[in-house]
Amino acid sequence: MSHRARPRTRRLRALLAAGLVTLALAGCSAIPSAGAALDVRQVTDQVEQTAPQAPQPGQQPDQIVRGFITASARPDRDAAAGTSLAAARQYLTPQAQVGWPSPDTPVLLLADGYRTDSDETAPGSVTVTGPSQGLLREDRSFAPPPAGETDPYTWTMTLQQIDGEWRISNPPPQLLIQAGDFAGAYQRKVVYFLDASGTVVVPDPRYLVVSSTEINRADRLMDLLLDGPSAALDGAAVSQFGPEAALRSNVTADADGVLRVDLTGVDVSTPALRRALAAQIVWTLYTTSPRIAISVDGEPLDPTQLVYTVATVSSFDPDRVAGTGQVASDPYYVDPEGDVVGLQDPTLEWPQVGVRISAAALSAATGAEAAVATDPQGGQQLLIGPATADTLQAALRADTLTAPVFSRTGDEVWVVQNGATRPEVYRVATAVTAGTASRVRVDSTALAGIGAVTALALSPDGVRVAVVAGERLWVGVIAPVQSATPTDTPETAGPQPDDSATQSPATVAVTDLVQIRPDLIDVGAVTFSSSRELTVAGATSPVSRRTLFSVGVDGRDLTGFTTTGIFNDVQSLAVSAGQPPLIGFGDRIWQLSGSATDGQWVTPLPSAPSLNGSSPFYPG
């Protein structure tokens, strides 16, 4: 399997033409999430109803520049179909139109309040200035602005008079669109790759121009699938499509609406490889068409499975709970005495550990338990135990520990120790034999220099990691360490790790950390609500409360939860599919009643006016 993105799509197409040198922008709908599904055809109609305006006679240079930027967000046709941005091209000189935009032109999101300043000493010179809100790369993955970036984007356009009308002679190297126009021109679509085991698909969001046909959408998605993972998944996700993989022909649809994908140059030598190949294709295309037929060199990929649906490859679901154990989704919280109890059923008590617990977690896959508690010797300790354990075993000690999180399979607990001084991530096995816990250090070099680490979260697919550092939100990936060598346990200023635990060298690393949503400050708790989205507690200004937000894993989309009923900073949160979100603030637990945008936060117990406690959690 290939780890890295490859050059632009390798196609065996008889219809390849010069039109493909224009910007490769195509459109697709978003994978359904917490919001209502969006019909791509409706968006297409909206785009057609607001067709871009061509330059008007007599417009001044600054008007031409602003009109050009507006028209750049109104693609009139799909680039892959042969033409794109025809209206925007009319704002350019004939020479500048040649080859514009190029296939690798990035798309820069410019703040809606950008400036255009004309140079009075140089007629026809207009400078565009404004904050950047991110970039779409060549592969149409989203890149947030670099952490700490304060300088605004700036570009000076030179205009010439053509037949008495001003036209731009030097368009910027990026396609500029206003952030407010982005949703009308682009939609999120998700391409799926594989985790290191090849048994779980991993979402890779992309943003594509709205397309007019299902076939075009499917064709463009297959292009992206063949090209490999985006930079955000570098080294962490793999693909069943090797360097020789290609489409033998365009994607088609038969009279029954079944999409037909015919490939060549792929390894289908084993059933596992065939299933992995099918999973990537079906998960990528199923929102375009629910039924997909896959062939290789004209022959069915699997003669016993002529048509695939997402149910056919449901075992690859990135949000599926691993294993066969069915742990009830009952919520828990830490009561004022520092014990873990069931929120709805107070009889669901954890073992008494004799010390105050500050945060806890329960594996949905295995039922294993983990808690961070005070250490009688000073600092904090990680306590772990299997399901139905009579007691919890101390597995790690440090000055401070983040709230514990379980791996996808439930056989490991992850924590960050000493996040304010020398942050180190540890994986601790939940199996305790003869009082000994296996502990593996995670290469945490990427955490250095980004601030005090106060929270860690793992994605359901096991590939992404979210970190709160310096009160900001960061997202990266968990990648294998190519050559692991034994290392000593790092020294700490306070209590040392438990001497009874065994040490192993780092085999994986937290890497490629990127700060997302720089507009969120005072970030506190964070968790993955799905493999595609995060739920995070943060503020949008120094004077606002810390409230709840839903954030895409790439940081592009941000949606605020209702704040009705929140009167203090949110300290903790818990989410689970099909269950009401929970938050903790003011030493009490609150539950969302109603929708995420229009509901309100209320006490979770109708029989009581309030519930005292903190750190709610669902099995995860």
Image (cartoon, grey):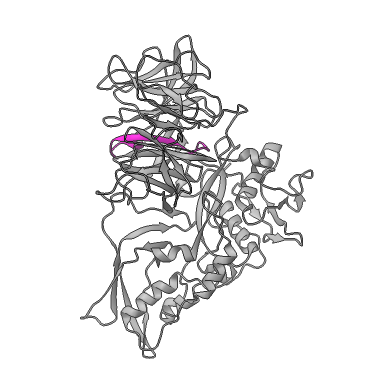
Q: Is 597 within the magenta?
A: no
| Residue 164 x/y as whole percent | 36, 90
Does the image show residue 221?
A: yes
The residue under the point 65% across, 41% down is 314
Range shown magenta: 446-465
| Residue 375 x/y as whole percent | 32, 17
Q: Nearer the viewer, residue 311 or 424?
A: 311
Count all numbered tags in the image, as a single digit. 0
Please, which residue is most extreme toward the bottom here? Answer: 163
| Quarter occupied by the N terminus | top right
Q: Is residue 236 left or right of residue 446?
A: right
| Residue 47 x/y as whole percent | 52, 71
Does the image show residue 487?
A: no
480 up-or-down from 545: above or below: above
276 up-or-down from 330: above or below: below
Q: Is 459 within the magenta?
A: yes
Q: Nearer the viewer, residue 266 or 452?
A: 452
Please, which residue is most extreme toward the top here? Answer: 434
| Residue 235 x/y as whole percent | 48, 41
